[in-house]
Image (cartoon, rainbow, N blue to C red):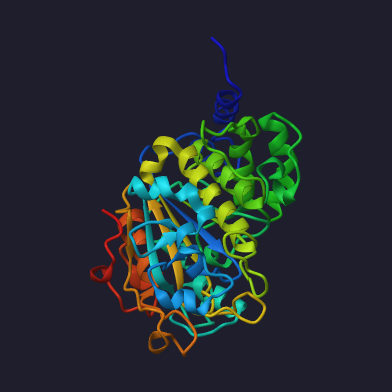
Amino acid sequence: MSITRRIFLKNGALAIVGTTMVPSFLTRAIYAAGTAAPGKKRLIVLFQWGAADGLNIVVPHGERAYYAMRPSIAIPRQSVIDLDGFFGLHPAMGAFKPLWEQKHLAIVHAAGSPDNTRSHFDAQDYMESGTPGVKATEDGWLNRALAGVNEPGASPFRAVAMGGSVPRTLAGPVPAVAIGDIRGFGVGGGQIASNTFEAMYAQSVDAVLHGTGNETFEAVKMLRAADPEKYTPAPGANYPRGRFGDSLRQVAQLVKANLGVEVAFADIGGWDHHVNEGNVQGQIANITGEFSQAIAALWTDFGDLAEDTVIVTMSEFGRTARENGNRGTDHGHANVMFVLGARVKGGKVYGRWPGLEQEHLYEGRDLALTTDFRQVLGEAVYRHLGNQDLAKVFPGFEKSSGDFLSLLS
């Protein structure tokens, strides 16, 4: 009978559990390895940094004012991927159409933060903290959401961010790990050179005992046991080249390695299109194609694990309804969110559409907001993750479960 490296590492570690030389956090990590319960719910949050142009992503092609205000950058009606006769996807987002037709993908238009700031920094902070207009909030909404879900002996991979540091949204009492690249993940960001548990322990224990990286050390041990470098995506999971596609491929690696991931965060920048935004081709086409292809690949890669997964996208604010003199758009207000999942009641655009006629614009220039982003996130937290204490997750937000859009079954 052959013994796999993963079994060797786990069983070899178990042999020394209980001795006085093994820290308690290491014992927890050993027992957690490979023991994630089936059916564990996962929430994946994807942030579009730079303020995405929701009007050129999910196009209101049935709205005459849209074309009147965007003579150079509007998506021609004949090029739009029609969804319901009024709304349609940017033509570069063909990867989303099957998910829409399968009713796994829902869209919430005219959504976002009620705060009227057009500062990237402030708006991002408010979206990640979940407290629009309040700068004093110390932790992030996604960390608070997870803190309300009882998980004794949780994996160090319970909360994961793809990047060089833990983002604002995962700041808080629930430990989170940031991974820029699985292949180089380790204590202090270094590569773990040895393949044996003992060598990993010896290499890392000094840093651990000096108070740095307990959770990271646990994660290093578990990640190496899962052999992530041997990972091959599922057939049909064609991730685009680039940082975002690579981040989502690594999210799939972590989830499929059975490491106990419950929430994951990844981001994609490049949405701040003040100049030469483009329409069917150009900047907006390039990034919407990358964005949709990567998400569709992640969904395909999950396979049966998609049954327990919800993916939500968001951006700090939208862009002006009118194009500017540089054939771009400036900082606006309401935007569009995508929600993807097996339990999502997809194939529908949610939220009240306010219209783009002059009298309907926010401050005479922007798409007006009709759905607070916390309504969308709150439903995912309440119905999917199972945390029903929304007053703690989104303090100061007076909406309740009765105000959900009923996106999830």
How many numbered dots are placed on residues in this image?
0
- Residue 240 seen from this side: yes
View extreme (top): residue: 1
Judged left or right of residue 124, residue 132 is: left
**Quadrant in which residue 359 is drawn:** bottom left
Judged left or right of residue 309, residue 196 is: right
Q: As displayed, is residue 293 above or below residue 268?
A: above
Image point (61%, 77%), residue name:
121
Image point (41%, 68%), residue name:
60
Q: Position of residue 275 (x, y in %)?
A: 67, 74
Judged left or right of residue 347, residue 267 is: right
Image point (63%, 71%), residue name:
272
Image point (45%, 50%), residue name:
96
View extreme (front): residue: 78
82 or 245, nearer to the observer: 82
- Residue 172 seen from this side: no
Q: As displayed, is residue 405 above or below residue 213?
A: below
208 or 284, nearer to the observer: 284
Q: Position of residue 143 (x, y in %)?
A: 48, 62
Q: Position of residue 323 (x, y in %)?
A: 57, 78
